[in-house]
Amino acid sequence: IAGISTSIPTSSNSET
């Protein structure tokens, strides 16, 4: 779980 949203934006999607 990082700041980058891989598939679904979990918390805060920094890099889309």
Image (spheres, rainbow, N blue to C red):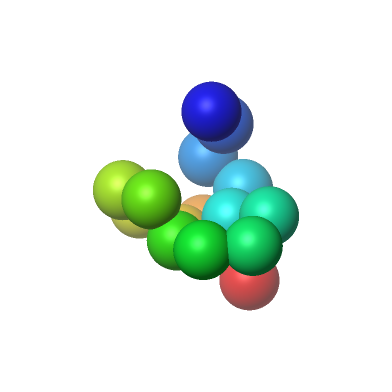
Residue 1 pos. (x, y %): 53, 28
Apparent side of residue 14 relative to residue 6 in the rendered image (left or right): left
The residue depicted at 45 percent of the width and 61 percent of the height is 9
State whether residue 4 is above or below residue 14.
above
Q: Quadrant of residue 16?
A: bottom right
Residue 7 in view, yes or no: yes
Residue 6 pos. (x, y %): 68, 55
Residue 15 in view, yes or no: no
In this view, the residue in front, 2 or 8, is 8
Q: Residue furthest front?
A: 7
In this view, the residue in front, 12 or 7, is 7
Residue 11 pos. (x, y %): 31, 48
Q: How many marks?
A: 0
Q: Residue furthest top?
A: 1
Apparent side of residue 3 relative to residue 10 in the rendered image (left or right): right
The residue depicted at 51 percent of the width and 63 percent of the height is 8
The residue depicted at 38 percent of the width and 50 percent of the height is 10
Q: Residue furthest left?
A: 11
State whether residue 13 is above or below residue 3.
below
